[in-house]
Amino acid sequence: MERTDDTANARFELDAALDFTGNPALCQVSRCCLGACASTQVNVRSRVLHAPGCYMYQRCHNLLPRLAQICMYASMCLALAPWAAWKMFSSLPPGFNGLAGVLSAFWACSALLLVLDSIATPMAFMKKCAAETQ
């Protein structure tokens, strides 16, 4: 890594050196993946990507499944908490079990939608690239 005074360039080089491709908690792909060398450009969600293959791979096969796991674990914890620690939760208002159930269902649906997004996005990307190359 070279010394530079430009913070954006330094962050890009640091991400590339650490092989940091994205943040699974927010499902954001890092700049080193977006700025990688590639000859093709694709417009995805109103952003021009210079390395669409790297972006799609990291987002759909790395970051989205990790975020789906986080949502699934949150759902399981909320569903099992009133049962596992019933003595602690018995002192809370009676509506807490219902709230935990609603939040658990929300996180479970979020995990399902993330998995569906990670399956459907590459399919749409491959169809679009196939149409552009013919």
Image (tube, rainbow, N blue to C red):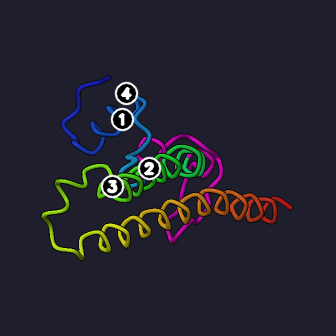
Return the residue nearer the eye: 81 or 53: 81
Return the residue nearer the eye: 106 or 81: 81
Q: Is residue 105 above or below residue 70?
A: below
Is tag 1's residue or tag 2's residue first in the polypeptide sequence? 1
Point out the frontmost of discs 3 and 4: 3
Circle 2 residues within 10 Å: few <14, some 14–19, many ≥20: many
Residue 60 lies within the magenta run: no
What mark, if any, has residue 15 been given in the picture? 1
Q: Which residues are magenta?
A: 28-54
Point out the frontmost of discs 3 and 1: 3
Is tag 3's residue or tag 1's residue first in the polypeptide sequence? 1
* Residue placed under numbered mark 3 in the picture: 83
User: From mark 3 to mark 1, how far is it between C-alphas?
Assistant: 43 Å
Is tag 3's residue or tag 4's residue first in the polypeptide sequence? 4
What mark, if any, has residue 29 been given in the picture? 2
Q: Is residue 19 above or below residue 25?
A: above
Is tag 2's residue or tag 3's residue first in the polypeptide sequence? 2
Residue 34 lies within the magenta run: yes
Residue in the image at 47% along x and 65% along y: 110
Element at badge 1?
Answer: helix
User: From mark 3 to mark 4, how far is it between C-alphas?
Assistant: 42 Å
Label 1 sits on what residue type? Asp
For the N terminus, the image quarter is: top left
Label 4 sits on what residue type? Leu
- Asked if the residue under mark 2 is in contact with the one under mark 1, i.e. CB atoms within 8 Å, the reply is no
Circle 3 residues within 10 Å: few <14, some 14–19, many ≥20: few
- Asked if the residue under mark 3 is in contact with the one under mark 2, i.e. CB atoms within 8 Å, the reply is no
Residue in the image at 86% along x and 62% along y: 134
* Residue placed under numbered mark 4 in the picture: 18
User: From mark 1 to mark 2, how far is it between C-alphas?
Assistant: 11 Å
User: From mark 2 to mark 3, how far is it between C-alphas?
Assistant: 38 Å
